[in-house]
Amino acid sequence: MHKVLILGAGKIGALISGLLAESGSYKVDLADVDGAAAESVVREHGGTNLTAYALDASDAAALARHLAAHPVDAVISGLPYYCNVKVAEAARKAHTHYFDLTEDVEVTRAVRAIAVGASEAFVPQCGLAPGFISIAAAELITHFDELRAVKLRVGALPQHPNNVLKYSLTWSTEGLINEYGNPCQAISDGRITDVAPLEGLEEIEIDGTLYEAFNTSGGLGSLAETHGVRTETMNYKTIRYPGHCEQMRLLMNDLKLNHDRATLKHILENAVPQTLQDVVIVYAAVTGKQDGQLREENYVNKIYPQVIAGRLWSAIQVTTAAGITAVVDLVLEKKGKYQGFVAQEQFRLADIVANRFGRYYAPGGTKNLSGEIVAAGKTGHQRRKKAVNS
């Protein structure tokens, strides 16, 4: 069995730990600065392959001591992006594989530097975007003799928007603000360049529904460095319902809250509700030459909430956790194949969706399941109820 340490018992860490532990192939240590939070997740999932620890991973010495006392094959960080450099450094010193969910460009560059010469794999930017979207786009790229344009579009949206932002908080508020406020990488006229966030607004229609998309930071991952030299344009944009971008420009630019992110975080978390009734849209479009003809190919998928281990999980939780667990599984099962810095686009789409964890990306789901479970009153306190009954 593989042994892994998961740092962070939040929305995503809880599902990652459950997927791995309940597979029967992993012994999982789940650590959080709040030991009670980790223990709650362990009680929720049950079983014998999941152990909770109280650990402040921002304390480099404490993390090093934990890894020395409890050696693992891999460290998986479900922590905020700004914690990940210290975690990657600790993984390097402990000679263990490293995985994270960061969308932050500077953190990824730091992890790349830490990974130089490592015999273990250092795989940042797992999850949805960056992550799965890069894998899907890279697969389409292999179908072309010449490239002209590569578009990556992803959105995690409420199924039933009813506020002025037309949005619900489905994941990390800090990560969301980071994406909306930091410079974005793109390929323009064959050159890597930085473009402004919340710009490049466009309309996109998928299955008859109109959305908007605009520049956000980090979603392109390392794809521009890997394939950018071959294409004229490449960019990543976040999908939202029409009108969202205008409201965020008001908050972040006109009211200057991009320079006061703590206040913006408080405003959003106080006013914008969370939801389990979401939908994740994955859209990749590649244009180029095939056999001398100009063609376009698309990968389009909608993923809805799913029941895993008797509990309803949101689409963003499912897609993020499935993305990173599939990659972890592939790396650990193919010992020695992956070393040093590993880009998401090094994984093949067919391998991801055929994986026991990646299968949660299978198309064909609907919003009906989450609607029925919510209407039955089974989601409001589902974690607390299961913990009490265990």
Image (cartoon, rainbow, N blue to C red):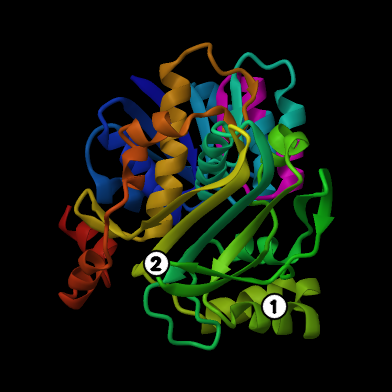
Judge left or right: residue 210 versus residue 301. Answer: right
Task: Judge depth for marks 2 and 1 and give the one in front.
Answer: 2
- Name which quarter of the figure residue 281 lies in: bottom left
N-term-proximal mark, 2 vs 1: 2
Q: Residue at x 29, y 32 (%)?
A: 49
Judge left or right: residue 52 versus residue 200. Answer: left
**Magenta region, residue range:** 90-110
Q: On screen, 243 above or below 309?
A: below
Q: Residue furthest top?
A: 336
Q: On screen, 99 above or below 97?
A: below
Q: Which residue is mark 1?
A: 263
Q: Position of residue 354 (x, y in %)?
A: 33, 32
Q: Residue at x 56, y 80 (%)?
A: 242
Instruction: Name the disc covering residue 200, or none.
Output: none
Please say whether residue 6 is visible from this viewpoint.
Answer: yes
Q: Which residue is mark 2?
A: 207
Q: Nearer the viewer, residue 367 or 63?
A: 367
What is the C-alpha distance between the residues marked 2 and 1?
Answer: 37 Å
Magenta span contains residue 95? yes
Q: On screen, 262 above or below 35?
A: below
Q: Nearer the viewer, residue 297 or 101?
A: 297
Q: Nearer the viewer, residue 322 or 84?
A: 322
